[in-house]
Amino acid sequence: MFSLVFLMLLVHFSLVSPQSLSTDNALHVKNIIILAGQSNMAGRGGVINNTTWDGIVPPECRPNPLILRLSAALTWQEAQEPLHRDIDFTKICGVGPGMAFSNSVLQRDLGIGVIGLVPCAIGGTNISEWRRGGILYNQLVVRAQAALHGGGGMIRAILWYQGESDALDPEDAKLYKKRLKKFITHVRSDLRSPLLPFIQVALASGGAYVDIIRKAQLEIDLPNVRCVDAKGLALQPPDNLHLTTAAQVELGTMLADAFLQTMAPLPVRSSAPQRFRNIFLDLLLRLLR
Ligand SMILES: *[C@@H]1O[C@H](CO)[C@@H](O)[C@H](O)[C@H]1NC(C)=O
Ligand SMILES: *[C@@H]1O[C@H](CO)[C@@H](O)[C@H](O)[C@H]1NC(C)=O
Ligand SMILES: *[C@@H]1O[C@H](CO)[C@@H](O)[C@H](O)[C@H]1NC(C)=O
């Protein structure tokens, strides 16, 4: 009798695999992704001489009903390029990595459901301007909280592409690692998600001290912080500071790879059923002995 109950429980827990849990949730949980940093996150792909966007949207960046964007007015709308048009509004925005990232994630994991992008990047900003309590930091937190408002959403990651401005000065470059670590720790704490995946981009361009910044980015040793390397991706002439549209598509795919890796183990969800399963298996084996 008891063994029958245990057998049924065992079968139940064995069937509820982490995969099917995530698929069930996907139908009503919005995957919120925060986009932050400076111009290459805001997107300058296809912007000519800082004055006009060519309007070219490659297939990888096309709208999709499953990709939403939180506007500056804090409303959800179907996302389309340029994602930062009403956020980094004093500049001309073009293509960034956000749409290519989202389409790439959906292409490989349709079960993930809706992606809710929260653009927060502002061109030309340095890491000090992103410190806790500053305008940019507060705006990020307010927008992230607005994205969660009403439930039905979960912040899945911050995508971060920043540091070109700090590569102009040797002192700022030297302090970058410490400042970035502080930013990550603070933002995770204020979003009440101590292990929130933080996926950053190692710079493709920047001032004279760019290698010091890149080293800091590649070496950061906090849990669940990943780094994708943009070095070698195509830059737009004449200033060679900003990724081209094609390069942003490549970067979006790289960010999607890194993001899907953070999704794979789902430690909180998968370990609990696993532990219970082992207890039941243990009991069952003992009863059958
Ligand atoms: C961009 O600016 C450069 C000079 O800075 C000029 O030679 C070039 O024609 C400009 N390109 C366009 C498309 O306006
Ligand atoms: C575009 O803006 C950047 C700063 O974001 C500046 O360094 C660059 O010289 C500008 N390019 C042109 C062609 O005006
Ligand atoms: C960062 O940017 C701000 C605003 O442009 C500037 O005042 C500041 O000197 C920059 N650098 C540091 C280290 O704060």
Image (tube, helix red, strand yellow):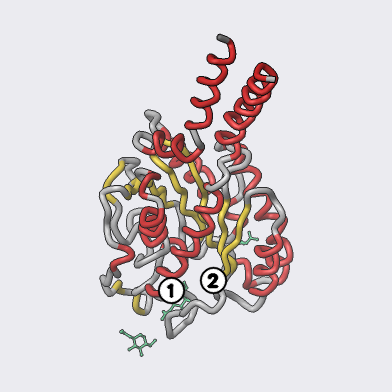
The answer to whether 119 is drawn above or below residue 138 in the figure is below
x then y, percent, for residue 11? 51, 26
x then y, percent, for residue 138? 52, 43
Alpha carbon distance from label 1 to label 2: 9 Å
Q: Quadrant of ligand 2?
A: bottom left
Q: Mark 2 and ligand 2: say if the CB distance to the nearest ligand atom is below 8 Å.
A: no
- Residue 6 in which image quadrant: top right
Nearest to the observer: residue 41 or residue 166: 41
x then y, percent, for residue 274? 60, 32
The answer to whether 218 is drawn above or below residue 236 in the figure is above
The answer to whether 20 is drawn above or below residue 289 in the figure is below
Tell me how many marks there are. 2
Residue for point 60% across, 76% down: 207
* Circle 2: residue type: Ala
Camera sees residue 146? no
Which residue in the rendered view is the most extreme toward the front? Answer: 289
Q: Residues within 10 Å of mark 2 (few under 14, many from 20)?
A: many
Camera sees residue 284? yes
Which secondary structure lies at badge 2? loop
Residue for point 30% across, 52% down: 79
Judge from the rendering whether residue 149 lies leftward or rightward of residue 160; answer left or right.
Answer: left
Q: Quadrant of the N terminus?
A: top right
Nearest to the observer: residue 157 or residue 182: 157
Which secondary structure lies at badge 1? helix
Residue for point 47% across, 58% down: 256
> Which residue is the site of mark 1?
247
> Which residue is the site of mark 2?
230
The answer to whether 108 is drawn above or below residue 75 in the figure is below
x then y, percent, for residue 252? 44, 63
Q: Mark 1 and ligand 2: say if the CB distance to the nearest ligand atom is below 8 Å.
A: no
Q: Are marks 1 and 2 in contact (CB under 8 Å)?
A: yes
Judge from the rendering whether residue 286 lies leftward or rightward of residue 105; answer left or right.
Answer: right
